[in-house]
Image (cartoon, helix red, strand yellow):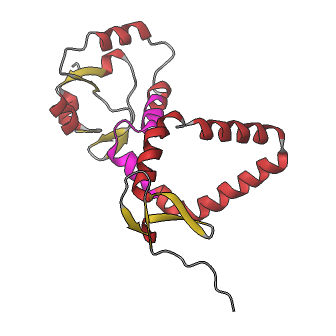
Amino acid sequence: MKSGPKIKESKICPVCGVDKPRTDYYKKLNSISHKCKDCTKVDLNSRSHRYIGRYSEYQNDWRRKKYATEAEYREKISEQKKALYQVKKDELNQKRRDRWANDPKCPARKYYRRKDVKNRTPKWVDLNEILEFYANCPKGKHIDHIIPLKGFIDGRPVTGLHVLWNLQYLTPAENLKKRNRITETYLSKYVKR
């Protein structure tokens, strides 16, 4: 009975010149790689800057073209997205709620804020005066609506208008303390008798 060639337990790496065990080399079919793992990583890192993004750009272009031309592929992707959403629904929704609550620059929050301002700006208002009021805001001050666009007066819901006479300058501390809640006594100092 013939036996195959005897497998060596170690090999000298031609790059670093160190005798290393077979476990320090990547497997290649029935053999091991030419260089040890450490030398291979160094070599790949030294050349990686030339290839970063090329493959992904090629793949993304291919996917866009296929999505635009093949209805079957579009349907497949749609099903995959639905299935993935069902798996990660709770996690995604929790991330959205956390971002809404904690990130003042959240795009959804900005969208709804712009929508609120637009819906509460009457057609007869002079927008140039409001823009001038915003432009003249002193440094270190916030612009606040005296009667909030969506807020509460002594616990009762109220909606104010986005008009010049409803705007005021406040320090950041006062504005954050006021939030969207006011009282009748606070409002009485703005009412002309």
Position of residue 42 measured from the top left corner of the image (x, y, whole percent): 41, 47
In magenta segment, residue 65: no
Image quadrant containing the N terminus: bottom right
Q: With respect to residue 62, does 72 lie above or below?
A: below
Q: Is residue 178 visible?
A: yes
Q: Is residue 126 visible?
A: no
Residue farthest to the bottom, as pictured: 1
- Residue appearing at x 72%, y 52% in the figure: 78
Image quadrant containing the C terminus: top left
Closer to us: 43 or 72: 43
Q: Is residue 85 left or right of residue 131?
A: right
In magenta segment, residue 111: yes
Principal secondary structure, stretch drawn in magenta? helix
The stretch in magenta equals 94-114
Quarter of the view holding residue 142: top left
Q: With respect to residue 7, does 74 lie above or below?
A: above
Position of residue 12 measured from the top left corner of the image (x, y, whole percent): 42, 62
- Residue appearing at x 37%, y 53% in the figure: 16
Position of residue 156 measured from the top left corner of the image (x, y, whole percent): 33, 45
Q: With respect to residue 103, does 36 lie above or below?
A: below
Closer to us: 28 or 146: 28
Position of residue 38 measured from the top left corner of the image (x, y, whole percent): 39, 55
- Residue appearing at x 64%, y 86% in the figure: 3
Q: How many marks?
A: 0
